[in-house]
Image: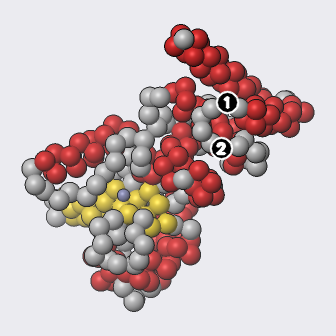
Amino acid sequence: MSETFSSDKVTTLVPYKVPSIYIVKGKRVDLPRRMAMATPDTALAIATLNRRVAEKGGVLYFSDGYRSSDMQLQAHLDYKASRASGGNRAYSPPPGGSWHEAGRADDIDVKTIHETIEGGYETFWDIAIEIGWHFVIPEPDPNAPEAWHIEFRGPFQELKEKIGYKEACRAAIRDIGGHPDDKYDDDDVQLIQADLLMLGYDVGPVDGIVGKKSRAAAQDFLTFIGPRAEEGDKKRVADRLCTRLEAVTWIRKQRRVKKR
Ligand SMILES: [Zn+2]
């Protein structure tokens, strides 16, 4: 996660070029630019997937990639509207809950890949997993809802195992400069804890509460980063981390005082 320290906006999305499911004036077009964006490691995983799949005769058409939180909100509202009118549109979570918002998920045309690749969807499944992609369905069933959805969690996979799917997803969204939701104060602590945990520090539970362990871990991190202070960005991140922990603790204290 060294790129996390490069700026306030952390990991920058890069564009990629893939054929989409969309046909305009009789011609297949590339996935629109606003969707064809991913973190650098995911973009590389997309290129690798395309190459490996093509080697087996497979054709991949993409229907979705990155979603800004506005786009995610729209997808969620479309889902709700569809449900309300008896439709069967696939579930789309509200903003803050999708790896699409982290530039780490894509949707592909299952029918085409299943029909073109040697061995069908199962081959696609094996190739994708080998590269480091994850599916949200348990078995390689091309007819299952969400069979089209693939996630490249990268460093957040390890985090997912520690703090769970949802929290890791939020951390991944934060990693590209997004705001998973508006509960900033508690969220901040939880994400700082998640960051520290990923860097190998023992923060205790990732619970959004600044306890002894969280504080000690932040301090250890600051001490570690200290001698490298000439690398301005790292120092700034470390400072911000401790300042935030302090600020959040202070806010919580005020709240407790008020409640009494
Ligand atoms: Zn998806």
Q: Is residue 190 left or right of residue 20?
A: right
Q: Quadrant of residue 228?
A: top right
Read off the residue under disc 2. Answer: 205
**Where the C terminus falls, by quadrant?**
top right
Q: Residue at x 44, y 67 (%)?
A: 135
Circle 1 residues within 10 Å: few <14, some 14–19, many ≥20: many
**Circles 2, 1 touching at the beta carbon (< 8 Å):** no
> Can you name the residue that lies furthest to the bottom here?
119
Out of 2 and 238, give the one closest to the viewer: 238
- The alpha-carbon separation of the residues under discs 2 and 1 comes to 10 Å
Read off the residue under disc 1. Answer: 210
> Can you name the residue that lies furthest to the front here?
260
Q: Residue at x 55, y 43 (%)?
A: 171
Can you give x and y, in whole percent of width and height, for residue 151 in the image?
47, 60
Establish whether ligand 1 lies closer than 8 Å to the Cβ of label 2.
Answer: no
Q: Amino acid at mark 1?
A: Val
> Can residue 13 be seen here?
no
> Can residue 93 be seen here?
yes
Q: Is residue 43 above or below residue 51?
A: above
Image quarter for ligand 1 equals: bottom left
Can you give x and y, in whole percent of width and height, for residue 40 in the image?
57, 53
For the residue labelled by badge 1, is the local secondary structure a helix, a strand or a loop? loop
Circle 2 residues within 10 Å: few <14, some 14–19, many ≥20: some
Which tag, 2 or 1, sits closer to the chain's start? 2
